[in-house]
């Protein structure tokens, strides 16, 4: 269970390569780039090529799904990005939390100098145009639909649905350019790929669900032990392995097959689903002080 074999996973399908080229060719059409990340994995869900791709354009980071993430951890990430002179905003695209601040923040912080220059030159009526980028399944389409007040972008709970770029007009002289999701060509750090799998950013079909659940359980035991015990009504000494925890949960939930064995696959699916839906509580999988050396 130490390693997940990912050598045969196609992390960078053809449409993603096309998107990378499209981002570079469309930069001249926009005033700023808004990068959406998963608040539970703010660095792992960023495309490491984005710094190069955006080529110095003003930027903003949206910490989406903040309702699923640890509040204190999210604030640490906002401070982290602010310290790097990148404006960050935590939002929940499902409830709309934080979205009222989106356009005002763009205009008062991200594009403050540009808009002051336009005002001075008598061009204050020029629309603000923003490119929206992010990895698959991070919530780009849901965010855009919430901002636009209508279903302008296709939404589906599986990676990689947005395949073509599309312009969306908001009612406040702001236009959004939605780009298809982009993933990195490869991951040097296997832990990044595993975190993306935990959150559903890559298809469940390409990873062994039981191994994935075991790795998640070990993380929870080490970082959110009380949440794990409370959710599954289990006790443990601290020496348990991933398989031990999976079997404990399966027994507690009555997920038994003929012969008295635990149905570990069904148990694993339950654990992953309950993590993703925050039934285990609000959990963040990485903190800036741990990842600081990467940037």
Image (spheres, rainbow, N blue to C red):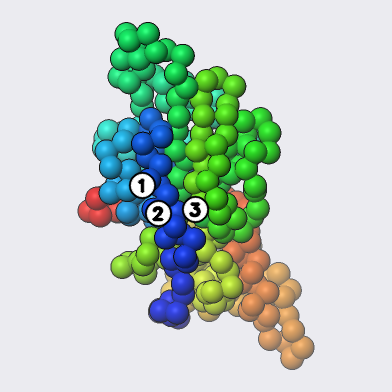
Answer whether residue 14 is visible to the viewer in this image.
Answer: yes
Does the CB distance between marks 3 and 2 fall below 8 Å? Answer: no
Tag 3: Cα neighbours inside 10 Å, few (<14), some, or many (≥20)?
many
Foreground tag (1 vs 3):
1
Q: Quadrant of residue 117?
A: top left
Q: Earlier in the sequence, mark 3 or mark 2?
A: 2
Element type at mark 1:
helix
Q: Residue furthest bottom?
A: 259
Element type at mark 3:
loop
Point out residue 174 in the picture as x, y percentages from the top left corner.
51, 25
Does the CB distance between marks 1 and 2 fall below 8 Å? Answer: yes
Answer whether residue 228 is visible to the viewer in this image.
Answer: no
Name the residue carrying label 2. 20
Closer-to-camera residue (76/177): 177
Q: Is residue 201 above or below residue 4?
A: above
Tag 2: Cα neighbours inside 10 Å, few (<14), some, or many (≥20)?
some
Closer-to-camera residue (109/72): 109
Instruction: Residue at 46% x, 72% y: name it.
Output: 10
Instruction: Residue at 41% x, 42% y: name it.
Output: 26
Real-space CA distance between mark 1 and mark 3, rounded to the nearest whole angstrom: 14 Å
Does the CB distance between marks 1 and 3 fall below 8 Å? Answer: no
Name the residue carrying label 3. 181
Foreground tag (3 vs 2):
2
Q: Is residue 202 above or below residue 34?
A: below
Name the residue carrying label 1. 24
Point out residue 82 in the picture as x, y percentages from the top left corner.
31, 33
Q: Earlier in the sequence, mark 1 or mark 3?
A: 1
Real-space CA distance between mark 1 and mark 2, rounded to the nearest whole angstrom: 7 Å
Element type at mark 2:
helix
Real-space CA distance between mark 3 and mark 2, rounded to the nearest whole angstrom: 9 Å
Q: Is residue 237 above or below residue 292?
A: below
């Amino acid at each position: 269970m130490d390693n997940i074999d990912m050598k045969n996973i196609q992390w960078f399908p053809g449409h993603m390569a096309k998107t990378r080229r499209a981002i570079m060719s469309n930069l001249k059409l926009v005033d700023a780039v808004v990068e959406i990340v998963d608040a539970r994995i703010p660095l792992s869900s960023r495309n490491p090529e984005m710094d190069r791709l955006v080529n110095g354009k003003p930027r903003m980071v949206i910490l989406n799904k903040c309702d699923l993430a640890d509040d204190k951890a999210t604030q640490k990430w906002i401070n982290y990005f602010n310290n790097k002179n990148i404006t960050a905003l935590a939002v929940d695209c499902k409830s709309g939390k934080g979205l009222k601040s989106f356009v005002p923040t763009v205009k008062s912080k991200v594009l403050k100098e540009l808009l002051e220059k336009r005002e001075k030159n008598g061009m204050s009526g020029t629309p603000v145009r923003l490119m929206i980028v992010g990895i698959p399944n991070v919530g780009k389409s849901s965010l855009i639909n919430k901002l636009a007040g209508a279903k302008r972008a296709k939404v589906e709970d599986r990676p990689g649905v947005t395949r073509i770029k599309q312009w969306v007009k908001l009612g406040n002289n702001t236009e959004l350019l939605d780009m298809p999701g982009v993933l990195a060509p490869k991951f040097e750090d296997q832990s990044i790929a595993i975190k993306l799998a935990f959150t559903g950013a890559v298809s469940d079909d390409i990873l062994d669900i039981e191994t994935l659940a075991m790795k998640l359980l070990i993380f929870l035991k080490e970082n959110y032990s009380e949440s794990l015990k409370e959710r599954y009504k289990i006790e443990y000494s601290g020496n348990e392995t991933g398989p031990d925890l999976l079997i404990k949960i399966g027994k507690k939930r009555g997920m038994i097959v003929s012969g008295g064995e635990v149905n570990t696959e069904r148990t694993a699916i339950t654990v992953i689903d309950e993590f993703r839906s925050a039934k285990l509580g609000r959990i963040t999988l990485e903190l800036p002080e741990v990842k600081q050396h990467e940037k």
